Image (cartoon, grey):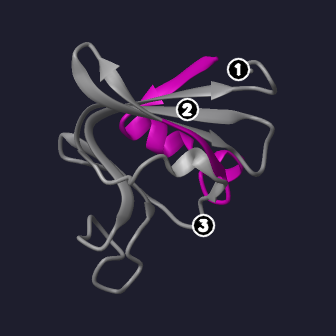
Amino acid sequence: MKFIGHNSDIINYLVNDLTLLNSTLKQFKEHEVDGEPAVSLMFELAFTDADVMLVFRNVFKNGFDGNPAAEPYEVDSCKFYHIGSKVYLSLDPDESEDGYDGISADDNDYVLASDVEGYIFEGNEHE
C-alpha cells in the first residue's frame, strides 16, 4: 500500500490509467477515524492491475444507500471535486446541463467530507 495524496492531490493523481472511470467499486465501509465519521471506498481500476482506496474523513453527508459494493458497481461517470474546505465525490452524478458542473441535488451515490486520503495497492498486495 502506498499513500498517493490527499484532497486536490489525490483528485489530480487519478487520471489516465488511474482514472476512476470504468473502475469497479469493490468495497464500501462506514466507520470512524479519530472519532469522526468516515467512509472508505475501494476501487478496482480498469486500465491497470492496481486498486485505489479513498478514505473520506469528517463526513458531512453520505448519499450512498446501503452497501453499493454488495453487487458489482461499475463507475460509468463521476464527479470528484475539492470545493473550498470540502471534498465531494459522486459516482452517479447529475449530467444535465444544470447539474453537470458542481454539486447537484440530483447527484446520487455521493460523499461530502472535509478531507480525503488516497492509497494505491499494486497487484495483489492488499488481499
At label 2, the amino acid type is Met
Q: Earlier in the sequence, mark 3 or mark 2?
A: 2
Task: Confirm whether residue 81 shows in the render.
Answer: no
Q: Earlier in the sequence, mark 2 or mark 1?
A: 2
User: Up-down: is 1 above or below 12?
Assistant: above
Q: Which residue is mark 3?
A: 76
Query: Along the line of sight, which residue is nearer the eye, 11 or 96?
Result: 96
Q: Which residue is mark 2?
A: 53
**Horizontal side, residue 65 vs residue 2: left or right:** left
Element on which disc 1 rests = loop
Q: How many marks?
A: 3
At label 1, the amino acid type is His
**Residue 98 sits in which quadrant?**
bottom left
Tell me whether circle 2 and circle 1 mark residues in contact (CB < 8 Å).
yes
Tell me whether circle 1 and circle 3 mark residues in contact (CB < 8 Å).
no
Q: Earlier in the sequence, mark 1 or mark 3?
A: 3
At label 3, the amino acid type is Asp
Q: Residue at x 54, y 40 (%)?
A: 13
- Crowding at mark 3 (Cα within 10 Å: few <14, some 14-19, many 20+): few
Q: Which residue is mark 1?
A: 126
Element on which disc 2 rests = strand
- How far apart are labels 1 and 3 at the CA level? 24 Å
Residues in magenta?
A: 1-28
Q: Residue at x 47, y 27 (%)?
A: 5
Residue 115: percent from left, percent from top: 30, 32
User: Up-down: is 64 above or below 53?
Assistant: below
Query: Which residue is the extreme one toward the bottom?
Result: 97
Tell me whether circle 3 and circle 2 mark residues in contact (CB < 8 Å).
no
User: Up-down: is 70 above or below 99?
Assistant: above
Instruction: Give the quarter of the figure containing the N terminus.
Output: top right
- How far apart are labels 3 and 2 at the CA level? 18 Å
